C-alpha cells in the first residue's frame, strides 16, 4: 500500500517544492501522506526563502560582505530546493537538512 501511495504522490510531491505551488498538494492530496510530507517541507522552505529575501534586502546595502552572505544564503536555498525535488522524485521520505525537522512537527 505504501509503495502505491508513493508512486501516486511523486508528481504531487515534486510540485510541492515549486514556490507557492506547495498549496496544490496540501489542498488537493490531503489523503496522500507522501505528497503531504513533501508539501509541508516545501511550505517551510518557501517561508525560509521569504525570510532570506528580507535578510538579503537588508544585506544588499552592505558592500561586498553583504553581497557575499546574500549569495551564500541563496545558494543554500537553491540546494535545499534541489535536494527536496530529488528526494520527492525518487520516492524518499527524507527530511531536508536544517529545516526538515520543522516541517515534521507541523500538524497540517
Image: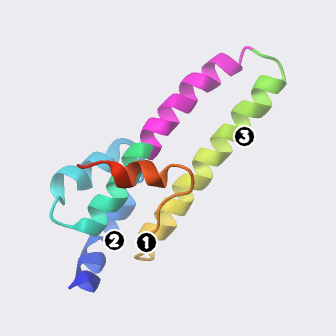
Disc 1 marks which residue?
A: 89
Question: Which quarter of the image is occupied by the N terminus?
Answer: bottom left
Gap in angstroms between the C-alphas marked 1 and 3: 26 Å
Q: Magenta stretch?
A: 45-61
Residue lying at 42% horizontally and 48% vertically, measured from the top left: 102
Q: For mark 2, give the secondary structure.
A: helix
Depth check: give the residue in front, 71 or 95.
95
**In this picture, is 40 found above or below 34?**
above
Whether 37 is among the magenta residues is no
Q: For mark 3, give the secondary structure.
A: helix
Residue 16 makes an appearance in the image:
no
> Residue 10: which numbered mark, if any?
2
Residue 99 makes an appearance in the image:
yes
Gap in angstroms between the C-alphas marked 3 and 2: 30 Å
Q: Is 58 situated left or right of 64 in this image?
A: left
> Residue 72: which numbered mark, if any?
3
Cβ–Cβ under 8 Å for marks 1 and 3: no
Amino acid at each position: 500500500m505504501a509503495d502505491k501511495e508513493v508512486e501516486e504522490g511523486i508528481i504531487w510531491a515534486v510540485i510541492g517544492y515549486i514556490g507557492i505551488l506547495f498549496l496544490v498538494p496540501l489542498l488537493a492530496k490531503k489523503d496522500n501522506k507522501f505528497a503531504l510530507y513533501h508539501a509541508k517541507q516545501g511550505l517551510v522552505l518557501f517561508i525560509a526563502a521569504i525570510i532570506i529575501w528580507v535578510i538579503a534586502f537588508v544585506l544588499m546595502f552592505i558592500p561586498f560582505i553583504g553581497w557575499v552572505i546574500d549569495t551564500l544564503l541563496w545558494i543554500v536555498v537553491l540546494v535545499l530546493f534541489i535536494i527536496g525535488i530529488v528526494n520527492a522524485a525518487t520516492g524518499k521520505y527524507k527530511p531536508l537538512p536544517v529545516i526538515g525537522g520543522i516541517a515534521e512537527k507541523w500538524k497540517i
